[in-house]
Each structure stands twice: as C-alpha cells, then as structure tokens.
Image (spheres, rainbow, N blue to C red):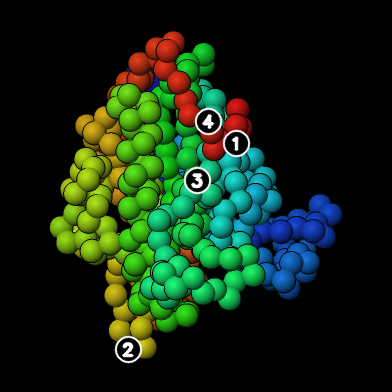
Amino acid sequence: MGGLEDLRLRVAEFNVENLFLLLDHYQGQDLSRLSEDQWQSLTISTTGNKPLEQVRALAKVFHEIDADIFMLCEVGGRESLENFNRHFLDDRYKVHLIEGNSDRGIDLGYLVKKSLPFKYDLISHKHRSIDFLYPHERQTQETGYTDRPSGRINSHRFSRDVLELRLFEEGAVQPALVVMLVHLKSQLDRDRIDPSGRDRRKAELEKLMKIYSEIESDLGGQTPILIAGDFNGLAQKQKPDPEFEAIYRDTSLMDVLEIAQVPLADRYTFMQIGRNSSQSRQLDYIFVSPQLQGRIVKNETFVYRYKDEWGFVAPPPRNLNEKKLLPSDHYPVVLTLEGLTASSGSEDASVDESSSTPSR
C-alpha cells in the first residue's frame, strides 16, 4: 500500500455499550460453546462481562464494517479490548487505549488494522482543565469555605477524555492524519445540580474545540483532523443543542453525514425508549476539518444498521426488551475517505508531545 495519496481509508465511530470482557479464569475454553453462566464465571470482576450473545453479535458487526480504524466509546479497559480483538476479531487489530477519567471504568480506545502503513502516537488530554465549576463550587471559591480535605477545586476535567491518535507515514515528522475521540458528559444528573448535564457538556465541548484549534495551529493548519465520538446530544448543523453551537461558530468542522447528504431521518444513532413512546436521536458524530471534506465517499458514509437473523436490516427497537437484544444501544457511524494527500512532512515541523504517551 502506498502513501496517503493512494490510500482509501474506512473509519467507524462506535459506542460499544459497556464492553467489559475480562477472562481471569480463561484456560483455553471454546468460547463459541459456552453458556452465559459459564461465560460470566470467567471473570472475577464485580462488573460482569458484556453478555456473550451480544459480544458475538458485536463481532459480526465489526467484521461486516471492516473498518481500518475503529474509534470506540465505553470500552471496559485495555484488557477487555485486547480480549475482544484476540478472541473475536482474529487479532487483526492493534489496540490503542489510555485509561480515562470515567467513574464507571468505560474508556475510549482505538482498534487499528495491523496492515496499515503507519506509525502512531497516542495522546491523552484527560488531565486538561475544562474551566468549569458548578454554581455551588463557584460560591465556595468566592466565600473561601470548603468541606474538601484537599482544599478548593479550581475546575473539573473531562468526564472521560479526549484521546488523540496521530498517524505518521514512515520517516515523517508531521502527522499525516490526527484523530480525536471523545465521549462527552452524559445527560444523567444524579446530584440534580446540572439538568441533563448540559452545562458540563457545554464546557467539555468548548474545551474540545479549543484543543482542536491548538492542534491545528501547532501543525501549521495543513494536517487533516477528524473528531469523533458520543456527544450525548444533538450536534447537527440544522438545529444543534445550545451546548454545541461553538462547533459551527468557532470552527470550519463539518459533520460527515451532512456532507454525504444522509437524510436527517436516517442519521439516528440511538433509540430513546420511554414508557409509552420511543424517540430516535443522533448522539454519535464524525466531524472533519476542511482538508478532508472533499475526500468523503458519500455513498460509503452512513449510519450502520443491525441485521436480523436472515441478513436483512432489523427495524429499530420498540421497547427495552428489543433494545437489549442489540449488540449495543448505539449504532456505528461509518466514514470512507479516498484520494487523501499527505500533509507537508517538512523537516522543521514538530509534534507537541508534552502530554503524549508514545505507542509507536
């Protein structure tokens, strides 16, 4: 395979819903023959493994999409992703994952085909401040009172992370492509201090846009950048939720489903099931910088739909029982790029590795 100018690249963003796959007691058992009880007995974790039938169905989705790079949310740690790759994906991928800030142990991770002609740097932004405090925390700062043993809190960080993957051609100093993966604050508000998590999510989104702008500037504005993940809200161009306005106000990023002219009705990636009704919502996105916007293969850029046992597209779930039968509660977003041109690999270009964890 040649350089980027010859490369056709398929990437997919996918929230794999609690992909915990820990095999503490695995001793070579045939995983295709295990019952669910036998499967769960392989882990000693208090968090059970993802149901085996869901894992098997998930693997079929991965094989069918056959992406060069999978950008994954809700992975139960590096060991889980390595086990999934080894036992269900024929060990075709290289695992890239750094543990993030999630209090549920759900991390961001990449699966990258071993056949790709790149070297990689993996960079975590989990320690970055998002310049955000809840109202009661701001009041604490103003009054000087705190019940925290360690003193005042200055700002929160990302709920999970922004996990950045840089792809380098052999011998290049400038990355050929930068991928940024994120899982923004959910709409849960257990403490009832931030309705639907909107203020925290807005702060995370605005910091994500700032990091994007920093990277764009540091790399001279020439390197193509892709941002993907579970945004936990409506970030479509037509009528985004208020917390996402910075995408369109401050950057030239575009949603690949918008570029591919996918009808709005076909863009949903999540089904919200209520007691008496259901609602389809797009929570998952891939945004691309201007360098990539003319390289999208429109008829191969879409939201993947799960198949039934006969191989036909399955209808969306109508209730929670049907939803639990799906491989994940999210649908993957698939993007195909072609005719890419490598960015200038000038010798004086530099990569900021102040927060990086190399994985070349």
* 84 lies above or below 92: below
- SS at mark 4? loop
Question: Mark 2 or mark 1, which is nearer to you?
Answer: 1
Q: Which residue is mark 3?
A: 125
Name which of mark 4 and mark 2 comes first in the sequence.
2
Q: Residue at x 19, y 54 (%)?
A: 237
Q: Residue furthest bottom?
A: 276
Label 2 to label 1: alpha-carbon separation? 47 Å
* Kind of residue at badge 2: Asn
Q: Nearer the viewer, residue 112 or 323?
A: 112
- SS at mark 3? loop
Question: Mark 2 or mark 3, which is nearer to you?
Answer: 3
Name which of mark 3 and mark 4 comes first in the sequence.
3
In which quadrant will I find the C terminus?
Answer: top right
The reply, left or right, for residue 76 in relation to residue 205 is right
Q: Which mark is residue 353?
A: 4
* Kind of residue at badge 4: Glu
* Kind of residue at badge 1: Thr
Name which of mark 2 and mark 1 comes first in the sequence.
2
Q: Residue at x 33, y 68 (%)?
A: 198
Q: Which residue is mark 1?
A: 357
* Kind of residue at badge 3: His
Q: Residue at x 47, y 79 (%)?
A: 190
Q: Is residue 66 visible?
A: no
Q: Residues within 10 Å of mark 1 (few under 14, many from 20)?
A: few
Q: Which residue is mark 2?
A: 276
Where does residue 149 sit, x and y in percent of width and height? 64, 70
